[in-house]
Image (spheres, coloured by chain):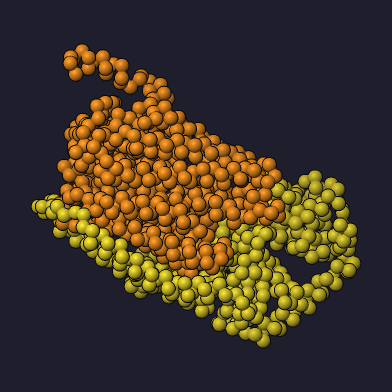
């Protein structure tokens, strides 16, 4: 600060390292955030290719392109890669980039661990994807890997799958610890908990969910490992075990997991909607409480995934009521977003388009979720395409649109350039139409009786499957446009101001665009 | 609304897919033919309309903002936020709606769980990839396999009307009787579903689940396995034929007589040609799904039988693996599933088909003795 020469030496010593070691050895939250985002997009394309194979096979009745064995590997790997490879790392990437900028911290609290938790991921996915080339093929038992299909009857590659899940779990847990340590310790002076931006709040709660349930996932795959290789019988009735135990343990992880994939999107959308409505979020405190309530309830609803396994009546009723309750805090969030837009001054740049579509389509996914919560009706919906439609509505326009909205919102901050608005709007509209074309007809297919995870189907399902496949191809191809837009934005474009969105609020907009390699070396004061 | 959707669908369908214009564009659940399925249908419609109404209100406010409160139209933002009364209201109102919804749902669920006082008990066992139906009061049972020919699945033949939803032996039930279903599985978890009955229950190996139904209209009802159970999960349909009681009783008598006759066949003296003929048929029904119709298998999970050491080597080992299965693999123990005649015929067929010309012949009596010496 005292002399020009000083600044120069500082930059020299503290700028990014040159070459590959910048990425291999970095402890910088911005570099690690970028790596997470790039990795997750690569996985999104890989998992997307598998979805294209699935939709191509389902384009018409009969077996045309792949055999049932390979079809099952595709559905399994598509689910695993999208959940653990695309959605979760994307949110960790956003957290890495944005949490320190939002709370006025110089970096994440545990930077070396940060590097380690990222680099574990490519290793885990290398192992997982390599199973496709093993004798007997990749895991073929669905992303929920129910025993005994995944144990006694699983392919030899199952052990590699288990190892990959262990590594992903370690990565996620370390990432979560880092997030909690950063948020609780490194906030700028004056930023009390109830002044934290909502993205920070939702990530804090998500991180606690991760720490609570990833060990449960590790436990359930370890029990599988024992059953397969060491002669135990956790899930084998002939040895005194119980296949349903697997489902209880898996869904105790699995249900909070679905909120892990949506809560950070809730947070991001709660920044984007006020910014483009030019009006403060309607109810900040109630939004925080709602996220907390959803997170707590997510621990006591797991058996709603298992209404047909023969849970006793009392259990069935408990899980039905608890599940219906989740609609209350979720409704509070939707009402708050709408009340924020009401009588604002709205404009519809790409982040806002994705955020508004998020609210509408996620709500539709919430409606089908409420229908699924009604246990007697669930007997008809369970394991049909109605469920497939439901969770794709909460994950694609929910998690994924939330990620796209965040990416467009913060791209100017990351790159220092404005992205091409026309192309971004094209990306939105093609994604929006493709996604609805792909997934809305699945509601009809499920209600008409089409089970999920089948490579071939009866003739009455033919027409809607064809529509759905066309929509899926459209959605899939459109995502290459996103790649093009981001690359174009990184390479150049109109220079972005420190605060490119006139309605945006928060510390991240007080630093220049692109954000310097080191920010907030001196903490800002929050009033 | 449904009519419009159908018309729009038919229009699109007619333009896009003239060849498939026969297929239908059903967009909703059907009420089904049992009391349970009708109750489920009315719950489904109630919750659907509640969602539609909430959606219209919420999205209505939102679209109003989108159209009227645009910056491009010069709308200046208001600055209101935080209103505890509003927050409490939009917490309590949904809660009340949910309570109202939970009451009929609870009543239906309690009814669905009441499996007491059944007239007919049927045990359903899921296998990879077929269903076994056993009439517990009548002491007979049989398997129900997919009847769609592979040529239709592989597009070498036109697909029939009930493509993938047809079986060789449907489950037969009498109309108007309370039927208790006891569900279990032999290998992995399956799930038995007939949409028209509103019955879906998982069949879990080592455990027995209960469900019940009472079908009031005679007819043929079709469903499918709804729990991923491996390779041919998409190819194990459920077909139930509901018949008047008199017809049902006649059918039961015939089945019992046929079961008795089958037991007598074990004592008959079989010729090689007879065993080969029966063996080929039984093989295609029971073994071909994994080991393939030409015995080539799908290694490594499903070994080839053509030229295999077991099918061409020691006969005792061959009988043992068919009767007892091989633990830790997908090879099931067929000893309890098939009759002695079928076991003998299949083993004889496997030892002499596809160039495995061992010339060995296994008789039903040999199998019977083998099972009893254990």
Q: Residue furthest bottom?
A: B246
Chain identity for the colour orange used in the image = A
Task: Provide residue A472's location: percent of width, then percent of height.
Answer: 40, 52
Image location (x, y in percent) of residue A326: 39, 59
Q: Is residue A158 left or right of residue B253?
A: left
From the top left corner, tell me how far across and down residue B3 is, in percent.
35, 74
Kindly identify the residue that appears in the image at 42 percent across and 55 percent down.
Answer: A297
- Tell me the yellow chain: B
Q: Relative to residue A495, is residue A387 depicted above or below?
A: below
Quarter assignment of residue B187: bottom right
Q: Quadrant of the N terminus of chain B?
A: bottom left
- The percent position of residue B186, horizontal first and vertical second, equals 68, 59
Q: Is residue A459 visible?
A: no
Q: Residue at x 86, y 48 (%)?
A: B314
Left or right for A232, reference A425: right
Relative placement, left or right, of A497 versus A184 is left
Residue A118 visible within the image:
yes
Q: Residue sitting at 54 percent across and 42 percent down? A: A218
**Label total for image:** 0
Q: Quadrant of the C terminus of chain B?
A: bottom right
| Residue nearest the viewer, comparing B54 with B265 | B54
- Residue at position x 34%, y 37% from top? A184
Q: Quadrant of residue A415?
A: top left
Residue B9 versus residue A507: which sits nearer the camera?
A507
């Amino acid at each position: 600060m005292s002399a020009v020469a000083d600044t120069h030496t500082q930059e020299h010593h503290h700028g990014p390292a040159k070459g590959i070691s910048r990425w291999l050895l970095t402890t910088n939250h911005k570099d690690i955030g970028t790596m997470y985002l790039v990795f997750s997009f690569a996985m999104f394309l890989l998992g997307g290719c598998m979805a294209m194979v699935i939709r191509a096979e389902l384009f018409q009745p009969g077996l045309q392109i792949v055999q049932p064995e390979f079809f099952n590997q595709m559905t399994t790997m598509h689910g695993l890669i999208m959940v653990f490879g695309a959605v979760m790392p994307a949110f960790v990437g956003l957290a890495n980039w944005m949490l320190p900028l939002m709370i006025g911290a110089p970096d994440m609290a545990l930077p070396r661990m940060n590097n380690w938790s990222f680099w574990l991921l490519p290793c885990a996915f290398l192992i997982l994807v390599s199973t496709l080339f093993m004798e007997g093929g990749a895991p073929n038992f669905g992303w929920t890997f129910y025993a005994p299909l995944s144990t006694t009857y699983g392919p030899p590659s199952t052990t590699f799958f288990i190892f990959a899940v262990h590594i992903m779990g370690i990565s996620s847990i370390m990432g979560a610890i880092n997030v909690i340590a950063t948020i609780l310790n490194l906030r700028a002076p004056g930023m009390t908990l109830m002044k934290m931006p909502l993205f920070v709040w939702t990530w804090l709660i998500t991180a606690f969910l991760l720490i609570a349930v990833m060990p449960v996932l590790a436990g359930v795959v370890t029990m599988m490992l024992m059953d397969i290789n060491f002669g135990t019988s956790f899930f084998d009735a002939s040895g005194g075990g119980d296949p349903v135990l697997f489902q209880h343990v898996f869904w105790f992880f699995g249900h909070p997991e679905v909120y892990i994939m949506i809560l950070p999107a809730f947070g991001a959308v709660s920044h984007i909607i006020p910014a483009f409505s030019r009006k403060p979020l309607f109810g900040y405190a109630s939004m925080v409480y709602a996220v907390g309530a959803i997170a707590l309830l997510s621990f006591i609803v797991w058996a709603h995934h298992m209404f047909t396994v023969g849970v006793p009546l009392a259990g069935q009723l408990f899980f039905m009521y608890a599940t219906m309750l989740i609609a209350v805090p979720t409704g509070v969030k939707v009402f708050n977003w709408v009340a924020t837009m009401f009588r604002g001054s709205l404009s519809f740049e790409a982040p806002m388009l994705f955020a508004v579509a998020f609210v509408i389509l996620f709500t539709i996914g919430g409606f089908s979720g409420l229908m699924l919560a009604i246990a007697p009706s669930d007997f008809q919906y369970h394991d049909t395409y109605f469920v497939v439609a439901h969770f794709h509505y909460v994950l694609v326009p929910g998690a994924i649109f939330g990620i796209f909205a965040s990416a467009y919102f913060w791209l100017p901050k990351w790159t220092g350039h404005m992205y091409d608005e026309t192309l971004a709007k094209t990306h939105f509209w093609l994604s929006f139409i493709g996604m609805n074309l792909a997934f809305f007809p699945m509601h009809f297919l499920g209600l008409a009786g089409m089970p999920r995870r089948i490579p071939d189907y009866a003739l009455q399902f033919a027409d809607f499957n064809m529509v759905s496949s066309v929509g899926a191809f459209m959605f899939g191809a459109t995502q290459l446009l996103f790649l093009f837009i981001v690359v174009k934005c990184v390479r150049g474009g109109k220079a972005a101001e420190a605060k490119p969105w006139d309605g945006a609020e928060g510390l991240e907009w007080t630093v220049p665009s692109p954000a310097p390699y080191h920010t907030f070396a001196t903490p800002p004061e929050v009033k | 609304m449904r009519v419009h959707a159908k018309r729009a669908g038919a229009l699109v369908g007619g333009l896009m897919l003239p060849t498939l214009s026969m297929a239908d564009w059903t967009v909703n659940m059907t009420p089904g033919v049992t009391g349970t399925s009708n109750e489920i249908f009315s719950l489904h419609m109630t919750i659907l309309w509640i969602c539609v109404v909430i959606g219209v209100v919420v999205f209505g406010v939102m679209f109003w903002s989108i159209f009227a409160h645009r910056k491009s139209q010069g709308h200046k933002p208001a600055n209101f936020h935080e209103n505890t009364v509003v927050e409490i209201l939009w917490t309590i109102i949904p809660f009340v709606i949910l309570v109202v919804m939970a009451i009929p749902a609870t009543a239906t669920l309690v009814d669905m769980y009441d499996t007491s006082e059944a007239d007919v008990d049927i045990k359903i066992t899921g296998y990879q990839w077929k269903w076994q139906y056993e009439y517990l009061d009548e002491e007979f049972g049989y398997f129900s396999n997919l009847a769609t020919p592979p040529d239709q699945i592989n597009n070498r033949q036109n697909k029939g009307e009930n493509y993938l939803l047809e079986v060789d032996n449907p489950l037969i039930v009498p109309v108007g009787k309370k039927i208790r279903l006891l569900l279990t599985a032999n290998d992995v978890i399956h799930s038995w579903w007939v949409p028209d009955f509103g019955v879906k229950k998982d069949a879990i190996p080592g455990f027995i689940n209960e469900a019940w139904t009472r079908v009031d209209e005679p007819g043929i009802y079709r469903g499918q396995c709804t729990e991923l159970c491996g390779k041919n999960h998409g190819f194990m349909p459920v077909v139930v034929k509901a018949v008047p009681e008199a017809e049902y009783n006649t059918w039961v008598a015939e089945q019992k007589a046929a079961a008795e006759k089958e037991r007598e066949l074990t004592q008959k003296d079989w010729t090689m040609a007879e065993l080969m003929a029966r063996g080929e048929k039984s093989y295609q029904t029971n073994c071909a799904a994994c080991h393939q119709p030409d015995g080539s298998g799908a290694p490594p999970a499903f070994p080839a039988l053509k030229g295999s050491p077991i099918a061409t080597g020691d006969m005792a080992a061959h009988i043992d693996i068919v009767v007892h299965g091989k633990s830790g693999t997908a090879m099931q123990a067929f000893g309890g599933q098939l009759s002695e005649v079928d076991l003998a015929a299949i083993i004889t067929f496997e030892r002499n088909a596809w160039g495995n010309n061992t010339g060995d012949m296994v008789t039903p009596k040999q199998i019977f003795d083998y099972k009893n010496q254990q």
